[in-house]
Amino acid sequence: MRMRPGTDSGLDGRPYAPRYKEPQDMADSSFDIVSKVERQEVDNALNQAAKEISQRYDFKNVGASISWSGEKILMEANSEERVKAILDVFETKLIKRGISLKALDAGEPQLSGKEYKIFASIEEGISQENAKKVAKIIRDEGPKGVKAQVQGDELRVSSKSRDDLQAVQALLKGKDFDFALQFVNYR
């Protein structure tokens, strides 16, 4: 395009478009809220508990055991007190391995023949109902401009400000939920 001498417009009289681009809005930062448990860590805790139960004197001759039964954990002993003690040992090992007890869903001792049994499962994922509760807390109590979006069994939190995201994490850590939360994929 040719330029007229002494002007900022072309031969057709229209001004030139600026040669620089406007800075684009910064991409939103985000993180995901999940409720996941390392299966290997649960295995390690279970194996440590089984080893301790086999070696402790108070578990001798009471038929005490802990093992996987499909996707559930089965604890057995010949008295209700002993099976509760097995659960206590297992919980202690989970805590030492960094697994929240909120992920453990242990039932009540049940009499089965001459033995008492406790079935426990490891809960993973945030239910739709719990995700909506967390999103409501973020919306009501969190900084303005923070968006929370349910995505399957996790929750994506995004904002233009990383400081706001850190404030949301601090807010949620201060709350007492009946399920375990972890913050992942911080970008």
Image: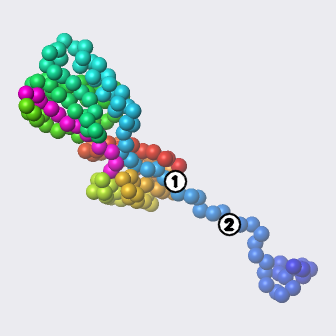
Label 1 packing within 10 angstroms: few (<14), some (14-19), many (20+)? some
Q: Main secondary structure of the magenta part?
A: strand
Q: Measuring 43% from the left and 54% from the top, which residue is drawn there?
A: 157
- Mark number, residue 22: 2
Q: Amino acid under label 2?
A: Glu
- Residue at 52%, 53% (x, y): give it: 29
Q: Can the viewer see residue 36 in this picture?
A: yes
Side (left or right) of 53 relative to 185: left
Which residue lies at the image location 31% right of the left edge and 36% below the top edge? 100
Q: Is residue 2 above or below residue 111?
A: below
Quarter of the image with the N terminus is: bottom right
Q: Is residue 75 left or right of residue 145?
A: left
The stretch in magenta equals 114-126
Q: For marks 2 and 1, give the one nearer the viewer.
A: 1
Residue that extends furthest to the bottom in the rendered view of this protein: 12
Q: Write down the residue under mark 1.
A: 29
Residue 119 position by quadrant:
top left
Name the residue type under label 1: Ser
